[in-house]
Each structure stands twice: as structure tokens, then as C-alpha cells.
Image (cartoon, helix red, strand yellow):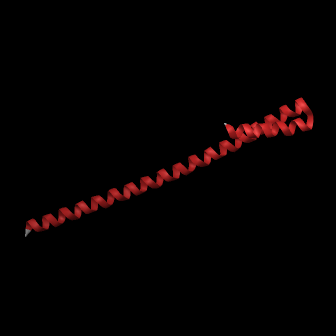
């Protein structure tokens, strides 16, 4: 009878350890998901910033070289260039 209780106790302990491992894995997965979302947000912000910078630079260069029409062409070129790279 003592052997049976030991076996049940061992089984319960194994079950508890398994649940703890699953809980830890779920917590780690949640942390990883949050980090991935943060990185994606930072990448999107960087792309927007780069697009604005290149569009502005293109507009300024176009304006310098060709007035208002050049500014429009330069802005369009800068915007397209930002989408390529």
C-alpha cells in the first residue's frame, strides 16, 4: 500500500512539474509576441521617417533645380526612392 501512495505521489509531482513547464513556456511565448510587435512597430516608424526624409530631400533638390514643378517631381522621386530601398 505504501508503494501505491508513492507512485500516486510521484505521478502528482510529475503532473505539477509538467504544468509549471507549460505555464513557463506560455509566459515566454507571450513575452516573445510582445517583443515582435514592438519591433514591427519600430520598423514601420523607421520606414515612415525614411520616406518623409527622402521625399523632403527630393522636393528641396527639385525646387532648387527647377522651381515649383521641380519640387513636385523631386518629391515624387524621393518618395518612390524611399519605397525602393
Please tell me which residue is depicted at 44% across the width and 54% down the height of the picture: 29
On the image, the x and y values in percent for residue 11 come to 20, 63
Please tell me which residue is depicted at 87% across the width and 37% down the height of the picture: 71
On the image, the x and y values in percent for residue 65 come to 88, 29
Instruction: Give the residue at the far right of this rendering.
Output: 67
Would you place residue 8 above or below residue 32 in this image? below
Instruction: Give the residue at the far top of this rendering.
Output: 65
- Relative placement, left or right, of 70 versus 83 is right
Between 3 and 69, the one lying in front of the other is 69
How many marks the image carries: the answer is 0
Would you place residue 58 above or below residue 14 in this image? above
On the image, the x and y values in percent for residue 66 come to 90, 32
Between 51 and 49, the one lying in front of the other is 51
Q: Please state, as top left, top right, bottom left or bottom right, where the N terminus lies in the image.
A: bottom left
On the image, the x and y values in percent for residue 8 come to 17, 67
Instruction: Give the residue at the far left of this rendering.
Output: 1
Q: Give the quarter of the image for residue 67.
A: top right
Please tell me which residue is depicted at 79% across the width and 34% down the height of the picture: 57
Q: Please state, as top left, top right, bottom left or bottom right, where the C terminus lies in the image.
A: top right
- Relative placement, left or right, of 78 versus 23 is right
Please tell me which residue is depicted at 70% across the width and 44% down the height of the picture: 48
Between 55 and 12, the one lying in front of the other is 55
Amino acid at each position: 500500500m505504501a508503494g501505491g501512495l508513492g507512485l500516486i505521489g510521484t505521478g502528482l509531482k510529475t503532473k505539477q512539474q509538467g504544468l509549471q513547464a507549460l505555464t513557463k513556456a506560455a509566459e515566454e511565448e507571450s513575452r516573445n509576441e510582445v517583443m515582435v510587435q514592438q519591433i514591427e512597430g519600430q520598423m514601420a516608424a523607421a520606414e515612415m521617417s525614411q520616406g518623409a526624409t527622402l521625399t523632403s530631400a527630393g522636393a528641396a533638390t527639385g525646387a532648387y533645380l527647377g522651381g515649383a514643378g521641380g519640387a513636385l517631381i523631386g518629391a515624387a522621386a524621393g518618395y518612390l526612392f524611399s519605397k525602393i530601398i
